[in-house]
């Protein structure tokens, strides 16, 4: 297998990262339109929520990437190429959360909108990670060298953890559980999204120990610090309703 794995259409060859990132946004948005709860708020308000999510995610993903190697960022703060070339999913999720909450206040939405976004986000992330895997070393999302049977040579002769594939497998499992719970369980508004964020942030905190990124923050990297902050926030939200009687859950939906 040779990386990157180009998408050959015969008359043109497309880079996998560009193709799958575009598909992630397109298909994820279509899943949102198809699965969203139509009775929560009008479509116009829903679109403003999407705008807030996109803008917040774009800003958050960049800011957290710049914290990956603070010294390098300071050295290259005048380099447009360096500042624009990277982004992080965790930063995008947390930034998107802030953007959504800001926009909801602006348009007067008081109900939770996160439950409708959990499955579309997971869909987009799975598709996007396929592109990350097919890109290989250039994407910088692989893991450290390993002797495990799962090790993959991305082109430099070294077997590495395919952390992109680990994440895809985890997201498919998490998405299946959330879909089942959304259909069958009696959870309060926002609980599905809270469970998604808690599960994913916990996964990323663990998986980043086997990623070859700088860990300058007491043995942790920038992603793990953000995950800890996010986990504190979401665990506090989960704590508010996990101990409530089941009948109380039904009354809040």
Image (cartoon, rainbow, N blue to C red):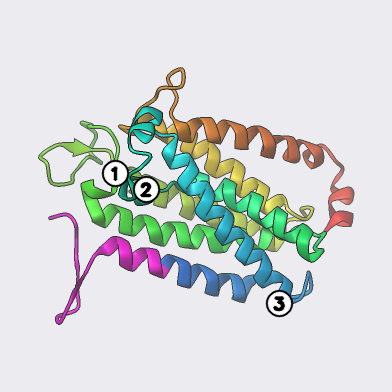
Q: Which residue is located at x 61 percent, y 33 percent?
A: 229
Percent of width and height locating residue 196? 60, 49
Q: Between 48 and 75, which is closer to the camera in this rendering?
A: 75
SS label for mark 1: loop
Picture layout, residue 233 above or below residue 46: above
Q: Is residue 3 magenta?
A: yes
Q: Earlier in the sequence, mark 3 or mark 1?
A: 3
Decide if residue 80 is on the left or right side of residue 28: left
Label 3: how many Cα within 10 Å (few below 14, some 14–19, many 20+): few
Percent of width and height locating residue 203? 49, 38
Picture layout, residue 151 above or below residue 182: above
Residue bearing the label numbered 3: 43
Picture layout, residue 57 above or below residue 235: below
Q: Is residue 240 magenta?
A: no
Residue bearing the label numbered 1: 140
- Magenta-drawn segment: 1-23
Q: Earlier in the sequence, mark 2 or mark 3?
A: 3
Residue bearing the label numbered 2: 86
Quarter of the image with the C terminus in it: bottom right
SS label for mark 3: helix
Spatial CA distance of label 2 from label 3 is 32 Å
Spatial CA distance of label 3 from label 1 is 38 Å
Percent of width and height locating residue 90? 50, 44
Q: Which residue is located at x 18 percent, y 46 percent?
A: 154
Select label 2 or label 3 by which is in front.
2
């Amino acid at each position: 297998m040779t990386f990157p794995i180009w998408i050959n259409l015969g008359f043109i060859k497309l880079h996998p990262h560009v193709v799958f990132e575009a598909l992630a946004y397109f298909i994820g948005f279509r899943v949102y339109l198809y699965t969203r709860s139509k009775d929560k708020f009008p479509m116009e308000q829903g679109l403003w929520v999407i705008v807030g999510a996109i803008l917040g995610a774009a800003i958050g993903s960049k800011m957290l990437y710049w914290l990956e190697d603070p010294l390098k960022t300071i050295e290259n703060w005048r380099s447009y190429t360096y500042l624009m070339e990277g982004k992080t999913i965790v930063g995008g999720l947390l930034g998107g959360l802030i953007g959504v909450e800001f926009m909801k206040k602006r348009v007067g939405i008081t109900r939770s909108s996160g439950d409708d976004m959990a499955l579309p986000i997971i869909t987009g992330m799975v598709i996007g990670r396929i592109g990350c895997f097919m890109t290989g070393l250039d994407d910088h999302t692989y893991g450290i060298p390993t002797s495990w049977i799962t090790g993959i040579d991305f082109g430099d002769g070294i077997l590495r953890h395919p952390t992109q594939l680990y994440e895809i497998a985890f997201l498919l499992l998490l998405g299946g559980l959330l879909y089942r719970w959304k259909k069958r369980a009696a959870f309060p508004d926002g609980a599905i999204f809270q469970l998604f964020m808690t599960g994913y942030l916990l996964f990323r905190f663990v998986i980043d120990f086997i990623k070859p990124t700088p860990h300058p923050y007491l043995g942790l990297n920038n992603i793990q610090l953000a995950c800890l902050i996010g986990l504190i926030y979401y665990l506090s939200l989960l704590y508010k309703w996990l101990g409530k009687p089941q009948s109380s859950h039904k009354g809040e939906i």
